[in-house]
Amino acid sequence: MKRLMVLTGGGDCPGLNAVIRAIVKRASQEKDWEVIGCIESFNGVLKEPTEIVVLDPASVSGIIVKGGTILGTTNKGGPFAWPIKNNDNTYSYVDRSDEMIRKLQILGVDAVINIGGDGSQRISQALFEKGLNIIGVPKTIDNDLSATDFTFGFQTAVQTVTEAIDKLVTTATSHNRVFIMEVMGRDAGWIALHSAIAGGADVCIIPEMPYKIEKIKEKIDSRYNKGKGFCIIIVAEGAHSATQGKISKISSEIGYTNDNLGGIGNVLMQELKDAGVEHDIRLTVLGHIQRGGTPTAYDRILASEFGVKAFELVLEGKFGEMVAYRHPEIVSVSIGKAISKPHLVSPSSRMVKTAKGLDIEFGN
Ligand code: F6P
């Protein structure tokens, strides 16, 4: 019997369980493969005792509708930077990758599928370079991986934001207010752009198009120029003005290497007041609600396609590859290439032109 280990790493997103299910179902069609799941990214192998579960069709039954991941996940630490507490309560980081590869050999693991975002796929690539038979499956609500047209989880996040905009519109019209909604996406404006179009927003501020506050004020004024009005502004967490950088904080969490983005909504609200906007302004920060809940049908399908393809790459021995969607095909690309550059919104793209055609102001 050959053994495949599946794990989910990095921040969660809707559709992870659909990938796990698809891998297990496809693998069960082969007589000589069994699947195990590693709990909390690679931590399940690194911990003593190990935390590994058997994944068979019965254990993945019904999980396609569930958000999150049945395997748990983490975006801290990992095999190359395992945190160890020192006597003085500070932390050091040790490279446990060789030890982990040895443990995988002892566990009889022939191949690994790592479902994760860019940080997780960097770990996949480094492990591949050390000889591990590994396949990557991209995930992120941010849709910021250049190797794939879409990542699963993105459509669900856009749906969540769109429904939130729909709700804000009713209260904004009742009170004639300006509403700012801050959404996720890191350095990419995909969630903001798609949901601004779907929700009929008036202003969309994205990292790729730094804003000038006067342009946004002009748009607000035009929305109120006949007396009563309202205005919906969607701002991506990584957005910034033409003169200032993005708002981010270094996290104090042990083993967490991402910057914490967020706060631009508040800054924007103050800047608009300072620029002379006299209407009520309210801020909504959607936060992790965008990552939660049941995946949309689209994300379940894309995630299922990725899962089946990932297992087929294992069968073909195409290690070091990551599955990707290149319309109309599900393809594979080298992980190294996939993580080399982010997928950002181009200011001259069709979607931006569409938004401008709908009178959405980018403020740049
Ligand atoms: O990458 C997905 C994402 O949700 C980003 O949009 C956001 O900036 C970040 O993760 C939040 O990470 P955490 O869950 O660690 O707070």
Image (cartoon, rainbow, N blue to C red):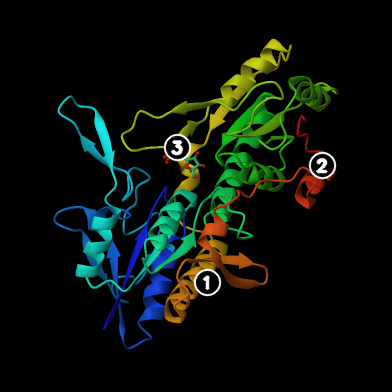
| Crowd around label 1: few <14 · some 14–19 · many ≥20 (10 Å) | many
Relative to the observer, which residue lies in front, 56 or 89? 89
| First of labels 1, 3 by sequence position | 3
Relative to the observer, which residue lies in front, 296 or 324? 324
Quarter of the rendering containing residue 301? bottom right
Q: Residue at x 72, y 42 (%)?
A: 200
Quarter of the rendering containing residue 37? bottom left
| Crowd around label 2: few <14 · some 14–19 · many ≥20 (10 Å) | some
> To which residue does mark 1 refer?
305
CA distance separating discs 2 and 1? 33 Å
> To which residue does mark 3 refer?
258
CA distance separating discs 1 and 3? 29 Å
Do callouts 1 and 3 mark residues in contact (Cβ within 8 Å)? no
Q: The residue tagged with tag 3: helix, strand or loop?
A: loop
| First of labels 3, 2 by sequence position | 3
- Position of residue 47 in the picture relative to residue 127 (left or right): left
From the viewer's perspective, is the residue at label 3 or at label 2 nearer?
A: 3
Where's the C terminus, which quadrant? top right
